Image: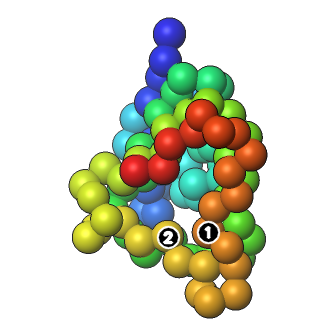
Amino acid sequence: MAATLHVDLNSTNPTAPYASRDTAAKEIQTAVNAAIDGDTVQVWDGHYMLLSEITVSKAITVQSANGPETTIVDGQGSVRCFYLESTTCVIE
């Protein structure tokens, strides 16, 4: 059964399996690593400044909770934001 894992920059209690916003991961890569094929990683509003690229090697969906106007993934001009190792992953 597919699950939704949450990511929130302001999470105060990041706890696997990141099943709610109250226990959301603080970093996108953390939730991606915990996801399995078919899962969705829901990224809540914020400006996510990356120090390294996010590698996605599973058949998962990584999606903004409220759209691109409120969720920014920023490689700061020096880091590629996503490296997609699976042709079946989706970035929304």
Q: Amino acid at mark 1?
A: Cys
Rendered position, 5 above or below 26: above
Give the residue displayed 68% in from the left and 34% down from the top. Answer: 58
Figure check: 82 above or below 73 = above
- Residue for badge 2: 73
Amino acid type at circle 2 is Val
- Answer left or right for 33 relative to 59: right
Residue extending farthest to the top is: 1
The image position of residue 43, as x and y in percent, is 42, 52
Q: Residue at image x 60%, y 34%? A: 88
Q: Quickly name the residue at label 1.
A: 81
SS under mark 2:
strand
Give the color scheme: rainbow, by chain, secondary structure or one colour: rainbow
Disc 1: CA contacts within 10 A as few (<14), some (14-19) or many (>=20): some
Q: Residue at the location (64% across, 26% down)?
A: 36
- In space, the residues marked 1 and 2 are separated at their CA atoms by 7 Å
Pointers 1 and 2 in contact (C-beta within 8 Å)? yes
The kind of secondary structure element at disc 1 is loop
In the displayed structure, would residue 91 be above or below residue 58?
A: below
Report whether 61 appears left or right of 79.
left
Q: Is residue 18 visible?
A: no
Question: Whole-percent x and y of residue 85?
Answer: 74, 46
Q: Is residue 82 visible?
A: yes
Q: Residue at image x 60%, y 79%? A: 75
Q: Is residue 18 above or below residue 26?
A: above
Q: Which quadrant holds residue 37?
A: top right
Q: Is residue 65 left or right of 88 when viewed as pictured?
A: left
